[in-house]
Amino acid sequence: MSENLKRTFLDEVSSLKSLADAANLRVKYLGKKGIITAKIKSLSSLSPEERRVAGREINELKQFIEEECERKESLLKSAELKGRLLAEAIDITLPGKAVSFGHEHPLSRTLREVVDIFTRMGFDVQEGPEVELDCYNFEALNIPKDHPARDMQDTFYISEDIVLRTHTSPVQVRVMEKKKPPLRFIAPGKVYRCDADVTHSPMFHQVEGLMVDKDITFSHLKGVLIAFIHQMFGPDIPVRFRPSYFPFTEPSAEIDMGCILCKSAGCRVCKGTGWLEILGAGMVNPKVLENVGYDSEEYTGFAFGMGIERITLLKYSIDDIRLLFENDIRFLRQF
Ligand code: FA5
């Protein structure tokens, strides 16, 4: 009888496929309600003589089953380990994952280049508040109450007397109030206008420039701005000064440079003219100098203001200002 049992057990052991099956088989034979356990319990119904013979037999079988179970389990364990090691193998010859580096935003790069060029020409850098008093943004710059630039459609009003600055020109007034000439500085920063299309954004960046001293003339203004454009866009770019109007400069000019896309031949971007407007400038209006307590007979100065977005669009031939603010990584990776 125990030979039959042994054979059945050996058949079952040899067909085991996993450690879980092995555990089940162990329970089936050696568990509390297992075949061997039941046999041991049934020994008590035998006579002492029979019990001695059957007892030895069943104990030998039990030991055999235990040893076989252990042997099979350790075989299955090493087979499973081997399988896992093969499946989870790491190919150390594969190249590592590349670390991607960020870089400067194109607007920050333009701003840095503009600041670098002017600081090399001896200009220092000043700052002013973005939430500005009406009197600095307009009044002190000779922009009267009924000037169209003060229209609700152009200016974000915080209250009747407080605005989001519409240009960096109020920094001219704030610095002149605190310092006596000679002055030579630029003022970069954010400005705000109620304006949005492919070339206009409600928030954009300007760089203001101001130089005040005795005997400053329009020639100084021309020299500084031509030097700037040549360093920024290349030494062969033609530059022209076109008469214009700003309430805080007199005379005023708008400065154009030859279209860099068509080399002044005329294209869609320059609307066939061969010229692109790049900044506004002029001689500081004597009224502005008097407003800050400077003697306009003794001192003269020039000022200029440029849009950083406009320069960036021109420099990289971008046709929509909104691309600069959308933070689309596919766009930014091109720089
Ligand atoms: C001014 O803001 C004057 N303060 C500039 C100035 C300073 C003139 C000192 C004389 C002396 P204007 O409104 O033209 O000027 O704006 C200057 C530049 O800002 C424009 O040439 C343009 O490049 C840019 N700009 C104006 N509006 C927007 C806008 N909504 N989005 C992006 N750029 C703009």
Image (spheres, rainbow, N blue to C red):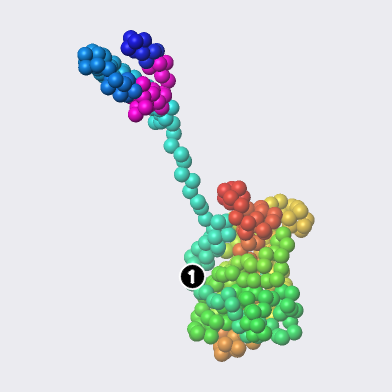
27 drawn magenta: yes
Write down the region rendered in magenta.
Answer: 12-35
Identify which amino acid the numbered label 1 is placed on: Gly
Q: Nearer the viewer, residue 73 or 258?
A: 73
Residue at screen point 60% across, 67% down:
205
State the residue position of label 1: 122
Note whether 90 is above or below 231 in the view shown.
Answer: above
Q: Quadrant of residue 28?
A: top left
Residue at screen point 21% across, 17% down:
48
Q: Nearer the viewer, residue 127 or 7?
A: 7
Note whether 125 is above or below 273 in the view shown.
Answer: below
Q: From the top left corner, tell me how far across and down residue 44 is, in percent.
A: 27, 22
Quadrant in which the N terminus appears: top left
Q: From the top left corner, tell me how far across and down residue 284 is, in percent.
A: 62, 80
* Residue at disc 1, secondary structure: loop
Is residue 201 in view from this perspective? yes
Magenta residues, dominant SS class: helix
